[in-house]
Image (tube, helix red, strand yellow):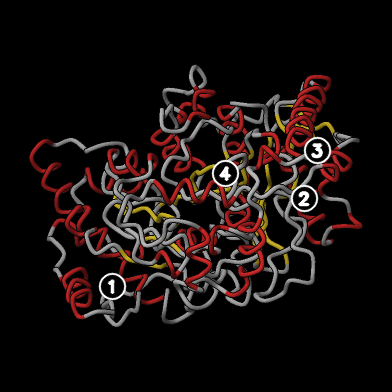
Amino acid sequence: MSKRLLLIWVAFTGICLSVNAQSFSPKQLREVSVADLHQAMRQGKLTATTLVQLYPDRIAAYDKQGPSINALILVNPKALTEAHRLDSLYKATGTFAGPLHGIPVIVKDNYDTYDMPTSNGTLAMKNSIPPDDAYVVRKMREAGAILIAKSNLAEFAYTGNFSVSSVLPGYSRNPYDTRRTTSGSSGGTAAAVAADFGTIGLGTDTGSSIRGPAANQSLVGFRCTMGLISRDGIVPLALTNDTGGPICKTVEDAARVLNVIAGYDPADSVTRRSQGNIQADYLRFLDKNGLKGARIGVFRQLCLPAKADSQVVALFDHAIEELRQAGATIIDPIRLPSLDSISRAMDTIPQLRRDFNAYLATLGPNAPHKTLGSIIKSKQFHPYLEKALLDVNADTLAPEQHKGWAKNLALRELMRKRLIAVMDSANIEAFVYPSFSYPPRLIGDLNTPSGTNNNALSPPTGFPAFTVPMGYTYGNLPAGLQFFGRPFSEPTLIKLCYAYEQATHHRVPPASTPPLSKKRKAKPALVY
């Protein structure tokens, strides 16, 4: 850490708590929700300034020390200044700046931020400061959220197998078992939210990386209908699949984030699809009785005993019984016979070269690199990516010029039609299946099955899929239950997920990051 940043960090953690805010203890920070924090602020027990001091205490104790979760690339040195501004505004007006007033958010480091670097996990882009915020980040700030930190990711968001970058040495670790992976490129965000380094988080999902990390850190993850959330200012991997969304501890908090970030954005043409499909308030679909009378299809193709861990299968069967006890009508099983053949018929067509070079062009004349080829020449990236980057950069055809492009689009449309036909024929509101059919893998294990089901249905169709905690295997390894629905059926999925969450309350915080004692002081010796 530079001397300047060290001084900022000391100031960041060294200011005394106000008298009114002293009643909010570090213990209360654990598992706290947006509503809890806002209630404490209205009661005079908490200020945004106090809150922004409490989270860095936990980061100092647990991210690079103690269990060494290693989830964060950069702690925002301007967070305290923003907290002071919000507190002054609230004191002067008696009203919050917005629905996320003073709420610290963990942002995956592939979202553009005008006041901090956006590295995409790549050493070559470590000092790249975009000219403006990503659309989603701007909306979060306008709602009063405070960017507390940028989180680690699989470099270029390229793999769901782990979260390791060339910016931050070492893997991000799962707080439930630090020997295990965070299960996706958004693993830094999920690990940070699970460990209470921030209240809420933002991830991205091309194939798995909102729902995968959320599931394996006992969190809620929303991959919404393609077009509901703008991708402007999110570093792309494959724009046919890329989207952003919330990673939170509760369905309610995820719905609060969705209220803020959903919307039409002229800078992302795909969001035209959302016009007429955006709800004024997703919170109104939080119904603890939402499973009563709901018709749920059990998609067992994604949890066959021969291709799944026995404890995950048992947990899934138990989750189906929990749905039934909460009032749902269960249709078991539901099948899409052509799923495997459609998936096998799709060609792999790289989009990174075209999409990433277009992103670099938005960074202006001061961008450290202008092309993917320039980054490859710099050698400033993680070695595991070298062959993949060389291969995609050598393919100079535009994705649409590949022979398989039209075939892939036709197969995607075929899958959409057949899934809707299955839902219609059985009058089903949603499918359910495990987000993973195996527990989180040990870090470094690329041989045993990952078990991810996240890329099977939602990415190729653009339909929404949400994961919520389903329980634990082998004592403490989280598993997620995924709800998959029709296009723009977010209200239905929120209703179903919330009802299941409230009926089960499966989430338990990780033992590796317990509450700090009231007298404990953050150590400024962090390296970011």
Secondary structure under tag 4 reads loop
Left or right of 216? Residue 260 is left
Q: Nearer the viewer, residue 267 or 512?
A: 267
The residue that label 1 is drawn on is: 518
Residue sitting at x 36%, y 70%: 58
Asked which secondary structure carries label 1, the reply is loop
Q: Amino acid at mark 1?
A: Lys
Q: Which mark is nearer the camera, 1 or 4?
A: 4
Residue at the spot of label 3: 298
Most extreme residue toward the top is: 276
Residue 222 visible to the viewer: yes
- Residue 366 percent coordinates (x, y): 30, 57
Identity of the amino acid at label 2?
A: Phe
Cα–Cα gap, marks 1 and 3: 47 Å
- Residue in view at x 56 percent, y 33 percent: 494
Q: Is residue 140 above or below residue 106?
A: above
Residue labelled with disc 2: 316
Of the numbered discs 1 and 4, the one sitting upstream in the chain is 4
Q: Is residue 374 above or below residue 424?
A: below
Amino acid type shown at disc 4: Asp
Viewer-nearest residue: 205 or 308: 205
N-terminal of the pair, mark 2 or mark 1, is 2
- What residue is pinned by disc 4? 242
Label 1 environment density (alpha carbons within 10 Å; few <14, some 14–19, many ≥20)? few
**Label 2 to label 1: alpha-carbon separation:** 40 Å
Dot 2 surroundings within 10 Å: few (below 14), some, or many (20 or more)?
Answer: many
> Label 3, label 2: how many angstroms apart (C-alpha)?
10 Å
Q: Separation of disc 2 and disc 4 at Cα? A: 28 Å
Q: Nearer the viewer, mark 2 or mark 1?
A: 2
Q: Quadrant of the C terminus?
A: bottom left
From the viewer's perspective, tell me whether residue 449 is left or right of residue 444: right
